[in-house]
Image: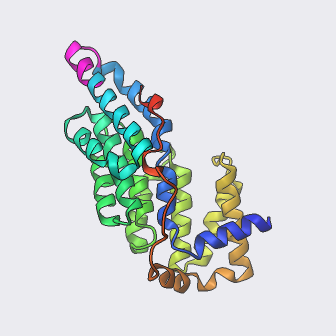
Amino acid sequence: MVDVFDEVEEQLRSDRYKSLALKSLPWVGALAAVAILGTGGWMGWTSYQQNQTNKATEAYQAALTTGQKSGPVAAFPAFEAISKTGTPVYKTLALLQMGGVRLEQNKTAEAVAYFDQAAKLAPNPVLADLAGLNSALALLDTASYKDVEARLTPLMGEKSPYRVQAKEALAFAKLRAGDLAGARSDFLVLSNSLDNSSDEIRERAQGAMAMIDSGTAKDLPAVVKAAMALPPPAALPPGAPVGVAPATAQ
């Protein structure tokens, strides 16, 4: 429990809110195959559409390979091209990757713009909600609580695949805003909910409650504000925004 406490305290007491968004980007890979297969049935019913899908698949895989070999920034132009000429699924995935690159460069406004564009363009609710979650997470350490809440609330419905992640993000937003009671209530639900199958989220919730109960979290808003005034971290894990294995886009 000590390790969990230390991990949560470190996460809360440094400028790491945007790292949650970066960590969520690999979900693109997990969902890419589902999203593409789910839309492939109606996209491939004509040879023209199938040809366009095949071209977009090849371009996306090539961009991922570039990112893995040369870094995410080097892959950005390729993803940008796909976002303009690819099929709706690949345009959305490319925009998500572009947002991840900009987020890693600490260009939050541009990242959010790409995530929001992806959410609007997404051909299915799964990708739309993923883009919306990334957008909210990117703003978690800078936007007002009301702004973050407005972005997360639509993602918390029973049918949303990211409802647990959205609820956790909202709990952290409340903690950052100084609403310790509200945050603790949300973390308690997350730690006990049968809807939460993630041990990592459950442990973070328990660690956050321990901080609140011990009084460690009472000065969190001031600590976070001071942390955000510091220079950004020197580097994030290499390739995080483009960490999707090529095979997932088949």
Q: In which quarter of the image is the N terminus?
A: bottom right
Q: Measured from the top left, where is residue 236 in percent x and y? A: 50, 60
What secondary structure do most residues of the magenta stretch adopt? helix
Colour scheme in the image? rainbow
Residue found 35% across the figure and 26% down from its top: 39
Q: Which residue lies furthest to the front in this view?
A: 70
Image: 170 above or below 159: below
Lateral position of residue 204 relative to residue 62, left or right: right
Q: Can see residue 107?
A: yes
Q: Can see residue 159?
A: no
Q: Measured from the top left, where is residue 164 in percent x and y? A: 56, 52
Check if residue 52 falls in the magenta segment.
yes
Image: 166 above or below 85: below
Residues 202 and 49: in front is 49
Q: Measured from the top left, where is residue 239 in percent x and y? A: 46, 49
Residues 90 and 167: in front is 90
Image: 12 above or below 91: below
Q: Quadrant of the C terminus?
A: top left
**Residue range (magenta):** 44-53
Lateral position of residue 139 relative to residue 191, left or right: left
Check if residue 66 falls in the magenta segment.
no
Residues 220 and 186: in front is 220
Q: Measured from the top left, where is residue 220 in percent x and y? A: 58, 81
Residue found 47% across the figure and 28% down from its top: 247
